[in-house]
Protein backbone atom coordinates (compact mmCIF):
# COMPACT_ATOMS: atom_id res chain seq x y z
CA UNK A 1 0.00 0.00 0.00
CA UNK A 2 1.07 3.62 -0.44
CA UNK A 3 2.83 5.36 2.45
CA UNK A 4 0.18 8.09 2.51
CA UNK A 5 -1.98 5.57 4.39
CA UNK A 6 0.69 4.95 7.04
CA UNK A 7 -0.08 6.41 10.46
CA UNK A 8 2.19 9.26 11.55
CA UNK A 9 2.00 8.91 15.33
CA UNK A 10 4.96 6.63 16.10
CA UNK A 11 8.50 7.95 15.92
CA UNK A 12 10.87 7.60 12.98
CA UNK A 13 13.89 5.32 12.92
CA UNK A 14 17.29 6.80 13.71
CA UNK A 15 17.36 10.27 15.24
CA UNK A 16 18.10 10.93 18.89
CA UNK A 17 17.24 7.36 19.82
CA UNK A 18 20.13 6.07 17.71
CA UNK A 19 22.56 8.60 19.21
CA UNK A 20 21.43 7.73 22.74
CA UNK A 21 22.01 4.05 22.02
CA UNK A 22 25.50 4.81 20.65
CA UNK A 23 26.43 6.66 23.84
CA UNK A 24 25.04 3.88 26.01
CA UNK A 25 27.09 1.23 24.21
CA UNK A 26 30.30 3.27 24.52
CA UNK A 27 29.70 3.71 28.25
CA UNK A 28 28.98 0.01 28.69
CA UNK A 29 32.28 -0.89 27.05
CA UNK A 30 34.14 0.64 29.99
CA UNK A 31 36.20 2.73 27.54
CA UNK A 32 33.98 5.62 26.43
CA UNK A 33 36.88 7.92 25.53
CA UNK A 34 39.03 5.33 23.80
CA UNK A 35 35.90 3.93 22.16
CA UNK A 36 34.99 7.38 20.86
CA UNK A 37 38.53 7.81 19.51
CA UNK A 38 38.22 4.46 17.76
CA UNK A 39 35.20 5.83 15.90
CA UNK A 40 37.52 8.42 14.32
CA UNK A 41 40.17 5.96 13.17
CA UNK A 42 39.14 2.34 12.79
CA UNK A 43 40.22 0.09 9.92
CA UNK A 44 41.72 2.99 7.99
CA UNK A 45 44.18 5.81 8.86
CA UNK A 46 41.89 8.82 8.44
CA UNK A 47 38.33 7.84 9.21
CA UNK A 48 36.13 4.92 10.13
CA UNK A 49 35.63 1.87 7.91
CA UNK A 50 32.49 0.54 9.57
CA UNK A 51 32.51 -3.18 10.47
CA UNK A 52 28.79 -3.22 11.23
CA UNK A 53 27.51 -4.34 7.83
CA UNK A 54 28.31 -4.69 4.15
CA UNK A 55 26.94 -1.32 3.03
CA UNK A 56 29.55 0.56 1.03
CA UNK A 57 31.46 3.69 2.02
CA UNK A 58 31.24 6.73 -0.29
CA UNK A 59 34.39 7.94 -2.02
CA UNK A 60 33.68 11.37 -0.55
CA UNK A 61 32.84 10.03 2.92
CA UNK A 62 33.60 11.68 6.22
CA UNK A 63 35.24 10.35 9.36
CA UNK A 64 31.75 9.79 10.74
CA UNK A 65 30.55 7.30 8.13
CA UNK A 66 29.06 4.80 10.58
CA UNK A 67 25.79 3.92 12.28
CA UNK A 68 24.46 2.62 15.56
CA UNK A 69 25.39 -0.95 14.61
CA UNK A 70 28.95 0.12 13.82
CA UNK A 71 29.31 1.82 17.19
CA UNK A 72 28.00 -1.30 18.92
CA UNK A 73 30.45 -3.51 17.00
CA UNK A 74 33.45 -1.37 17.91
CA UNK A 75 32.40 -0.85 21.54
CA UNK A 76 31.71 -4.58 21.86
CA UNK A 77 35.26 -5.44 20.84
CA UNK A 78 37.00 -2.44 22.46
CA UNK A 79 35.69 -3.35 25.90
CA UNK A 80 38.07 -3.38 28.85
CA UNK A 81 36.27 -6.40 30.31
CA UNK A 82 38.28 -9.63 30.24
CA UNK A 83 37.32 -13.30 30.44
CA UNK A 84 40.41 -14.55 32.29
CA UNK A 85 41.17 -18.05 33.57
CA UNK A 86 39.72 -16.89 36.90
CA UNK A 87 36.36 -16.37 35.20
CA UNK A 88 36.35 -19.94 33.87
CA UNK A 89 37.53 -21.32 37.21
CA UNK A 90 34.46 -19.78 38.83
CA UNK A 91 31.96 -21.24 36.35
CA UNK A 92 31.33 -24.74 35.12
CA UNK A 93 30.33 -25.23 31.50
CA UNK A 94 26.89 -26.26 32.75
CA UNK A 95 26.64 -22.83 34.41
CA UNK A 96 27.81 -21.03 31.28
CA UNK A 97 25.22 -22.81 29.13
CA UNK A 98 22.48 -21.17 31.22
CA UNK A 99 23.63 -17.67 30.20
CA UNK A 100 22.21 -15.90 27.19
CA UNK A 101 24.50 -15.07 24.27
CA UNK A 102 24.57 -11.44 25.41
CA UNK A 103 25.38 -12.33 29.02
CA UNK A 104 28.11 -14.75 28.00
CA UNK A 105 29.93 -12.36 25.70
CA UNK A 106 29.46 -9.47 28.12
CA UNK A 107 32.17 -10.98 30.32
CA UNK A 108 34.74 -9.64 27.88
CA UNK A 109 37.63 -10.70 25.71
CA UNK A 110 39.47 -13.97 26.12
CA UNK A 111 43.01 -13.61 27.47
CA UNK A 112 44.33 -17.19 27.30
CA UNK A 113 43.84 -20.32 25.24
CA UNK A 114 41.50 -22.60 27.17
CA UNK A 115 40.91 -26.36 26.96
CA UNK A 116 37.84 -28.18 28.23
CA UNK A 117 38.35 -30.56 31.16
CA UNK A 118 35.51 -33.07 31.40
CA UNK A 119 36.36 -34.14 34.95
CA UNK A 120 35.78 -30.67 36.40
CA UNK A 121 33.37 -29.48 33.66
CA UNK A 122 35.49 -26.36 33.34
CA UNK A 123 37.79 -24.70 30.84
CA UNK A 124 41.39 -24.71 32.05
CA UNK A 125 44.25 -22.61 30.66
CA UNK A 126 46.62 -24.37 28.26
CA UNK A 127 49.94 -23.26 26.78
CA UNK A 128 49.83 -22.27 23.10
CA UNK A 129 52.38 -24.91 22.10
CA UNK A 130 50.46 -27.62 23.93
CA UNK A 131 47.18 -26.52 22.32
CA UNK A 132 48.67 -26.51 18.81
CA UNK A 133 50.34 -29.88 19.38
CA UNK A 134 47.15 -31.53 20.60
CA UNK A 135 45.05 -30.07 17.79
CA UNK A 136 47.64 -31.13 15.22
CA UNK A 137 47.87 -34.66 16.60
CA UNK A 138 44.11 -35.16 16.39
CA UNK A 139 43.95 -33.79 12.84
CA UNK A 140 46.83 -36.09 11.81
CA UNK A 141 45.10 -39.06 13.42
CA UNK A 142 42.01 -38.82 11.20
CA UNK A 143 42.01 -41.43 8.44
CA UNK A 144 40.79 -38.89 5.87
CA UNK A 145 41.15 -35.08 5.76
CA UNK A 146 37.48 -34.88 4.69
CA UNK A 147 36.52 -35.96 8.22
CA UNK A 148 37.32 -32.43 9.45
CA UNK A 149 35.16 -29.33 8.95
CA UNK A 150 36.70 -25.83 8.74
CA UNK A 151 34.17 -23.05 9.33
CA UNK A 152 34.70 -19.35 8.64
CA UNK A 153 32.68 -16.32 9.59
CA UNK A 154 32.57 -12.95 7.87
CA UNK A 155 34.25 -11.64 11.02
CA UNK A 156 37.52 -13.10 9.70
CA UNK A 157 39.78 -10.66 7.85
CA UNK A 158 40.77 -11.31 4.25
CA UNK A 159 44.35 -11.97 5.30
CA UNK A 160 43.41 -14.49 8.01
CA UNK A 161 40.88 -16.20 5.73
CA UNK A 162 43.43 -16.52 2.91
CA UNK A 163 45.98 -18.18 5.20
CA UNK A 164 43.22 -20.37 6.64
CA UNK A 165 42.12 -21.73 3.26
CA UNK A 166 45.77 -22.34 2.33
CA UNK A 167 46.33 -24.31 5.56
CA UNK A 168 43.17 -26.38 5.03
CA UNK A 169 44.02 -27.22 1.41
CA UNK A 170 47.54 -28.18 2.43
CA UNK A 171 45.86 -30.45 4.97
CA UNK A 172 43.89 -31.95 2.10
CA UNK A 173 40.21 -30.95 2.03
CA UNK A 174 37.79 -28.40 0.61
CA UNK A 175 35.41 -28.68 3.56
CA UNK A 176 34.63 -24.99 4.00
CA UNK A 177 31.23 -24.47 5.62
CA UNK A 178 30.95 -20.69 5.64
CA UNK A 179 28.57 -18.06 6.94
CA UNK A 180 27.78 -17.11 3.34
CA UNK A 181 26.02 -20.49 3.01
CA UNK A 182 23.43 -19.12 5.42
CA UNK A 183 22.92 -15.69 3.88
CA UNK A 184 23.75 -14.79 0.26
CA UNK A 185 24.85 -18.07 -1.32
CA UNK A 186 21.70 -17.87 -3.44
CA UNK A 187 22.68 -14.43 -4.73
CA UNK A 188 26.08 -15.65 -5.85
CA UNK A 189 24.65 -18.71 -7.60
CA UNK A 190 21.77 -16.86 -9.27
CA UNK A 191 23.82 -13.88 -10.41
CA UNK A 192 26.53 -16.08 -11.88
CA UNK A 193 23.83 -17.80 -13.90
CA UNK A 194 22.18 -14.52 -14.90
CA UNK A 195 25.07 -12.13 -15.52
CA UNK A 196 28.23 -14.24 -15.20
CA UNK A 197 29.47 -12.84 -11.87
CA UNK A 198 28.13 -13.48 -8.38
CA UNK A 199 28.28 -9.87 -7.21
CA UNK A 200 26.18 -6.74 -7.46
CA UNK A 201 26.52 -4.42 -10.44
CA UNK A 202 26.09 -1.00 -8.81
CA UNK A 203 28.32 1.51 -7.09
CA UNK A 204 27.15 3.51 -4.10
CA UNK A 205 27.11 6.56 -6.35
CA UNK A 206 24.43 4.92 -8.51
CA UNK A 207 21.94 5.53 -5.69
CA UNK A 208 22.49 9.25 -6.34
CA UNK A 209 21.27 8.88 -9.93
CA UNK A 210 18.46 6.29 -9.74
CA UNK A 211 14.91 7.38 -10.58
CA UNK A 212 13.42 4.39 -8.74
CA UNK A 213 14.76 1.95 -6.17
CA UNK A 214 13.04 -1.38 -5.49
CA UNK A 215 13.82 -2.70 -1.99
CA UNK A 216 12.85 -6.37 -1.63
CA UNK A 217 13.05 -8.54 1.47
CA UNK A 218 15.36 -6.48 3.65
CA UNK A 219 15.25 -4.46 6.87
CA UNK A 220 18.00 -1.84 6.57
CA UNK A 221 16.99 -0.04 9.77
CA UNK A 222 17.90 -3.18 11.70
CA UNK A 223 20.69 -4.73 9.66
CA UNK A 224 22.46 -2.02 7.65
CA UNK A 225 21.21 1.39 8.87
CA UNK A 226 23.67 3.44 6.80
CA UNK A 227 21.68 2.40 3.74
CA UNK A 228 18.82 4.51 5.07
CA UNK A 229 20.95 7.63 4.61
CA UNK A 230 21.26 6.90 0.88
CA UNK A 231 17.57 6.02 0.57
CA UNK A 232 16.68 9.25 2.41
CA UNK A 233 18.79 11.33 0.02
CA UNK A 234 17.20 9.55 -2.94
CA UNK A 235 13.71 10.24 -1.56
CA UNK A 236 14.52 13.92 -0.97
CA UNK A 237 15.55 14.42 -4.59
CA UNK A 238 12.35 12.79 -5.82
CA UNK A 239 13.33 9.19 -6.53
CA UNK A 240 10.52 6.75 -5.88
CA UNK A 241 11.27 3.91 -3.48
CA UNK A 242 9.15 0.77 -3.75
CA UNK A 243 9.34 -1.65 -0.83
CA UNK A 244 8.28 -5.30 -0.78
CA UNK A 245 8.42 -6.57 2.80
CA UNK A 246 6.01 -8.82 4.73
CA UNK A 247 6.57 -6.70 7.84
CA UNK A 248 6.44 -2.95 8.25
CA UNK A 249 9.87 -1.71 9.20
CA UNK A 250 9.90 1.79 10.64
CA UNK A 251 13.17 2.74 8.92
CA UNK A 252 11.67 2.06 5.49
CA UNK A 253 8.68 4.22 6.37
CA UNK A 254 10.39 7.22 7.98
CA UNK A 255 13.97 8.00 8.94
CA UNK A 256 15.59 10.79 10.91
CA UNK A 257 19.24 11.05 9.91
CA UNK A 258 21.47 11.57 12.98
CA UNK A 259 24.02 13.28 10.72
CA UNK A 260 21.52 15.90 9.51
CA UNK A 261 21.83 18.69 12.10
CA UNK A 262 18.74 20.61 10.99
CA UNK A 263 16.50 17.54 10.94
CA UNK A 264 17.77 16.54 14.37
CA UNK A 265 17.22 19.99 15.89
CA UNK A 266 13.72 20.24 14.48
CA UNK A 267 12.82 16.71 15.46
CA UNK A 268 11.84 16.01 11.88
CA UNK A 269 12.07 12.95 9.66
CA UNK A 270 11.88 11.99 6.00
CA UNK A 271 9.38 9.63 4.38
CA UNK A 272 11.38 6.88 2.68
CA UNK A 273 9.04 4.54 0.78
CA UNK A 274 6.75 6.04 -1.83
CA UNK A 275 5.05 2.62 -2.11
CA UNK A 276 5.03 -0.14 0.50
CA UNK A 277 3.69 -3.61 -0.34
CA UNK A 278 3.44 -6.55 2.04
CA UNK A 279 3.64 -9.87 0.16
CA UNK A 280 3.15 -13.08 2.03
CA UNK A 281 6.26 -15.01 3.12
CA UNK A 282 8.01 -16.40 0.07
CA UNK A 283 5.76 -14.41 -2.26
CA UNK A 284 8.46 -12.21 -3.74
CA UNK A 285 9.00 -14.28 -6.87
CA UNK A 286 5.31 -14.18 -7.75
CA UNK A 287 5.24 -10.41 -7.15
CA UNK A 288 8.20 -9.87 -9.49
CA UNK A 289 6.66 -12.21 -12.08
CA UNK A 290 3.48 -10.16 -11.85
CA UNK A 291 5.37 -6.92 -12.47
CA UNK A 292 7.04 -8.50 -15.51
CA UNK A 293 3.60 -9.58 -16.76
CA UNK A 294 2.34 -6.01 -16.40
CA UNK A 295 5.36 -4.65 -18.28
CA UNK A 296 4.87 -7.09 -21.16
CA UNK A 297 1.17 -6.18 -21.34
CA UNK A 298 2.11 -2.49 -21.48
CA UNK A 299 4.57 -3.25 -24.28
CA UNK A 300 1.84 -4.93 -26.34
CA UNK A 301 -0.53 -2.03 -25.74
CA UNK A 302 2.10 0.52 -26.75
CA UNK A 303 2.92 -1.29 -29.98
CA UNK A 304 -0.78 -1.65 -30.82
CA UNK A 305 -1.30 2.09 -30.26
CA UNK A 306 1.74 3.04 -32.33
CA UNK A 307 3.59 4.38 -29.30
CA UNK A 308 7.29 3.91 -28.43
CA UNK A 309 8.05 0.45 -27.05
CA UNK A 310 8.25 -0.13 -23.30
CA UNK A 311 10.99 -2.78 -23.53
CA UNK A 312 14.63 -2.04 -24.34
CA UNK A 313 14.80 -4.22 -27.44
CA UNK A 314 18.38 -3.25 -28.27
CA UNK A 315 19.57 -4.38 -24.82
CA UNK A 316 17.58 -7.61 -25.01
CA UNK A 317 18.97 -8.42 -28.45
CA UNK A 318 22.61 -7.68 -27.55
CA UNK A 319 22.88 -8.96 -23.99
CA UNK A 320 20.12 -11.52 -23.36
CA UNK A 321 19.24 -15.00 -24.59
CA UNK A 322 15.96 -16.91 -24.62
CA UNK A 323 13.81 -13.81 -24.21
CA UNK A 324 10.97 -15.46 -26.15
CA UNK A 325 11.05 -18.45 -23.77
CA UNK A 326 10.94 -16.15 -20.75
CA UNK A 327 8.06 -14.18 -22.22
CA UNK A 328 6.14 -17.38 -22.87
CA UNK A 329 6.66 -18.47 -19.26
CA UNK A 330 5.42 -15.11 -17.95
CA UNK A 331 2.35 -15.13 -20.20
CA UNK A 332 1.56 -18.70 -19.13
CA UNK A 333 1.41 -17.58 -15.49
CA UNK A 334 -2.13 -16.43 -14.74
CA UNK A 335 -3.05 -13.50 -12.51
CA UNK A 336 -4.98 -15.72 -10.15
CA UNK A 337 -1.86 -17.79 -9.54
CA UNK A 338 0.26 -14.65 -9.07
CA UNK A 339 -2.20 -13.15 -6.59
CA UNK A 340 -2.49 -16.41 -4.67
CA UNK A 341 1.26 -16.92 -4.35
CA UNK A 342 2.27 -13.31 -3.75
CA UNK A 343 -0.51 -12.35 -1.36
CA UNK A 344 -0.91 -9.08 -3.30
CA UNK A 345 -3.67 -7.92 -5.61
CA UNK A 346 -3.22 -7.43 -9.31
CA UNK A 347 -3.86 -3.70 -8.84
CA UNK A 348 -1.04 -3.43 -6.28
CA UNK A 349 1.42 -5.26 -8.53
CA UNK A 350 0.46 -3.16 -11.55
CA UNK A 351 0.98 -0.01 -9.48
CA UNK A 352 4.52 -1.13 -8.63
CA UNK A 353 5.17 -2.01 -12.30
CA UNK A 354 4.04 1.48 -13.31
CA UNK A 355 6.80 2.98 -11.16
CA UNK A 356 9.31 0.74 -12.90
CA UNK A 357 8.12 1.70 -16.37
CA UNK A 358 8.08 5.43 -15.61
CA UNK A 359 11.70 5.41 -14.45
CA UNK A 360 14.69 5.66 -16.78
CA UNK A 361 17.16 4.31 -14.20
CA UNK A 362 16.16 1.59 -11.71
CA UNK A 363 18.08 -0.18 -8.96
CA UNK A 364 16.76 -3.38 -7.41
CA UNK A 365 18.22 -4.26 -4.01
CA UNK A 366 17.49 -7.27 -1.81
CA UNK A 367 18.75 -9.12 1.25
CA UNK A 368 18.13 -12.32 3.17
CA UNK A 369 14.36 -12.08 3.06
CA UNK A 370 14.83 -13.17 -0.55
CA UNK A 371 17.81 -15.50 -0.21
CA UNK A 372 16.65 -17.77 2.62
CA UNK A 373 14.00 -19.74 0.73
CA UNK A 374 13.99 -23.03 -1.11
CA UNK A 375 13.21 -21.07 -4.30
CA UNK A 376 15.64 -18.21 -3.59
CA UNK A 377 17.84 -18.78 -6.66
CA UNK A 378 14.79 -18.78 -8.91
CA UNK A 379 13.54 -15.58 -7.25
CA UNK A 380 16.82 -13.74 -7.86
CA UNK A 381 16.87 -14.96 -11.45
CA UNK A 382 13.36 -13.54 -11.78
CA UNK A 383 14.56 -10.19 -10.38
CA UNK A 384 17.40 -10.15 -12.92
CA UNK A 385 15.04 -10.98 -15.80
CA UNK A 386 12.69 -8.23 -14.69
CA UNK A 387 15.55 -5.73 -14.69
CA UNK A 388 16.71 -6.87 -18.13
CA UNK A 389 13.35 -5.97 -19.69
CA UNK A 390 14.20 -2.26 -19.76
CA UNK A 391 18.00 -2.55 -19.78
CA UNK A 392 18.41 -1.59 -16.13
CA UNK A 393 21.89 -3.00 -15.73
CA UNK A 394 25.35 -1.87 -16.76
CA UNK A 395 24.67 1.86 -16.77
CA UNK A 396 24.76 4.68 -14.18
CA UNK A 397 21.88 4.77 -11.71
CA UNK A 398 20.69 1.26 -12.51
CA UNK A 399 21.54 -2.31 -11.60
CA UNK A 400 21.34 -5.26 -9.25
CA UNK A 401 22.32 -4.79 -5.61
CA UNK A 402 22.38 -7.73 -3.16
CA UNK A 403 23.09 -6.34 0.32
CA UNK A 404 25.08 -8.83 2.33
CA UNK A 405 24.56 -8.77 6.07
CA UNK A 406 28.16 -8.84 7.23
CA UNK A 407 31.09 -6.70 6.22
CA UNK A 408 33.33 -9.54 4.99
CA UNK A 409 31.10 -12.30 3.67
CA UNK A 410 32.15 -11.48 0.10
CA UNK A 411 35.77 -10.99 1.15
CA UNK A 412 36.06 -14.54 2.47
CA UNK A 413 34.74 -15.91 -0.79
CA UNK A 414 37.11 -13.75 -2.85
CA UNK A 415 40.22 -15.06 -1.05
CA UNK A 416 39.31 -18.71 -1.44
CA UNK A 417 36.83 -19.76 1.25
CA UNK A 418 34.79 -21.88 -1.11
CA UNK A 419 33.78 -25.54 -0.83
CA UNK A 420 33.51 -25.60 -4.64
CA UNK A 421 36.66 -23.72 -5.67
CA UNK A 422 37.14 -22.71 -9.30
CA UNK A 423 39.75 -24.79 -11.12
CA UNK A 424 41.65 -21.62 -12.08
CA UNK A 425 42.04 -20.70 -8.40
CA UNK A 426 43.36 -24.15 -7.50
CA UNK A 427 45.74 -24.04 -10.49
CA UNK A 428 47.09 -20.71 -9.22
CA UNK A 429 47.65 -22.10 -5.72
CA UNK A 430 49.49 -25.07 -7.21
CA UNK A 431 51.78 -22.83 -9.29
CA UNK A 432 52.48 -20.41 -6.45
CA UNK A 433 53.00 -22.83 -3.55
CA UNK A 434 54.12 -26.03 -5.25
CA UNK A 435 51.56 -28.50 -3.92
CA UNK A 436 48.54 -30.24 -5.39
CA UNK A 437 45.41 -28.85 -3.71
CA UNK A 438 42.40 -31.17 -3.38
CA UNK A 439 40.00 -30.99 -6.33
CA UNK A 440 37.04 -32.80 -4.80
CA UNK A 441 34.22 -30.48 -3.74
CA UNK A 442 33.82 -30.17 0.01
CA UNK A 443 31.04 -29.55 2.53
CA UNK A 444 28.95 -26.43 2.90
CA UNK A 445 27.16 -25.67 6.19
CA UNK A 446 24.26 -28.06 5.57
CA UNK A 447 26.41 -31.00 4.49
CA UNK A 448 28.88 -30.32 7.32
CA UNK A 449 26.08 -30.57 9.88
CA UNK A 450 24.92 -33.78 8.24
CA UNK A 451 28.43 -35.21 8.41
CA UNK A 452 28.70 -34.34 12.10
CA UNK A 453 25.37 -35.99 12.82
CA UNK A 454 26.05 -39.20 10.90
CA UNK A 455 29.56 -39.59 12.31
CA UNK A 456 31.52 -39.07 9.10
CA UNK A 457 32.98 -35.82 10.51
CA UNK A 458 35.15 -36.01 13.63
CA UNK A 459 36.64 -32.52 13.93
CA UNK A 460 35.46 -28.93 13.67
CA UNK A 461 37.54 -25.74 13.64
CA UNK A 462 35.79 -22.37 13.54
CA UNK A 463 37.57 -19.16 12.52
CA UNK A 464 35.47 -16.42 14.09
CA UNK A 465 31.73 -16.34 14.50
CA UNK A 466 29.40 -18.52 16.52
CA UNK A 467 28.50 -21.59 14.46
CA UNK A 468 25.99 -23.09 16.88
CA UNK A 469 24.01 -19.86 17.07
CA UNK A 470 24.36 -18.86 13.42
CA UNK A 471 22.77 -22.07 12.18
CA UNK A 472 18.96 -22.34 12.08
CA UNK A 473 18.62 -25.30 14.51
CA UNK A 474 21.04 -24.42 17.31
CA UNK A 475 19.98 -27.30 19.57
CA UNK A 476 20.62 -29.86 16.85
CA UNK A 477 23.99 -28.32 15.95
CA UNK A 478 25.08 -28.20 19.60
CA UNK A 479 24.32 -31.93 19.79
CA UNK A 480 26.34 -32.54 16.63
CA UNK A 481 29.32 -30.56 17.94
CA UNK A 482 29.38 -32.52 21.21
CA UNK A 483 29.79 -35.78 19.28
CA UNK A 484 33.10 -34.73 17.73
CA UNK A 485 36.59 -35.78 18.74
CA UNK A 486 37.86 -32.19 18.34
CA UNK A 487 36.21 -28.77 18.37
CA UNK A 488 38.28 -25.59 18.16
CA UNK A 489 36.88 -22.07 18.26
CA UNK A 490 39.11 -19.15 17.34
CA UNK A 491 37.19 -16.23 18.84
CA UNK A 492 37.64 -13.02 20.80
CA UNK A 493 35.01 -13.83 23.43
CA UNK A 494 33.34 -16.88 24.94
CA UNK A 495 30.21 -17.96 23.07
CA UNK A 496 27.88 -20.92 22.94
CA UNK A 497 29.83 -22.66 20.19
Image (spheres, helix red, strand yellow):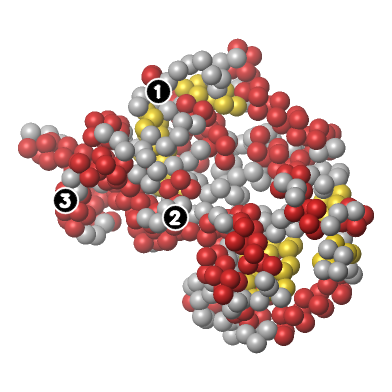
Please tell me which residue lies in front, 221 or 305: 221
**Quadrant location of the C terminus?**
bottom right
Residue 86 position in % (x across, y down):
92, 54
Q: Secondary structure at mark 1?
A: helix
Q: CA distance from mark 3 to mark 2?
A: 26 Å
Residue at left offset 72%, top offset 46%:
100
Residue 298 position in % (x across, y down):
17, 37
Give the foreground label among 2 and 1.
1
Q: Dot 3 corresponds to which residue?
A: 332
**Lower sequence index among marks 3 and 2:** 2
**Lower sequence index among marks 2 and 1:** 1
Q: Dot 1 corresponds to which residue?
A: 3
Q: Dot 2 corresponds to which residue?
A: 187
Residue at left offset 40%, top offset 56%:
374
Quarter of the rendering containing residue 395 = top left
Residue 286 position in % (x across, y down):
29, 45
Amino acid sequence: MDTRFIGKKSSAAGGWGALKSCGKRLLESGTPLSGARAMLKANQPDGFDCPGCAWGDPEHGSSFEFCENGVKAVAWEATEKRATPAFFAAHTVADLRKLSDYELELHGRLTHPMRYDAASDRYLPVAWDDAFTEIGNILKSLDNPDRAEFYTSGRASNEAAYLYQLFVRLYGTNNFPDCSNMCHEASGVALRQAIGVGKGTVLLEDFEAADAIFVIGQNPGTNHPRMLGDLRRAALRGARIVVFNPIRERGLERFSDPQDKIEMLRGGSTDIASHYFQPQLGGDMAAVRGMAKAVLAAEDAAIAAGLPPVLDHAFLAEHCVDFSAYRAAVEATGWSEIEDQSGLTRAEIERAAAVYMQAERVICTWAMGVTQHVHSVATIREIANFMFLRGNIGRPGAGLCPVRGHSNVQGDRTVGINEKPPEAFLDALEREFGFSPPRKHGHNVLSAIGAMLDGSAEAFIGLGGNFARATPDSTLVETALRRLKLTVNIATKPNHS
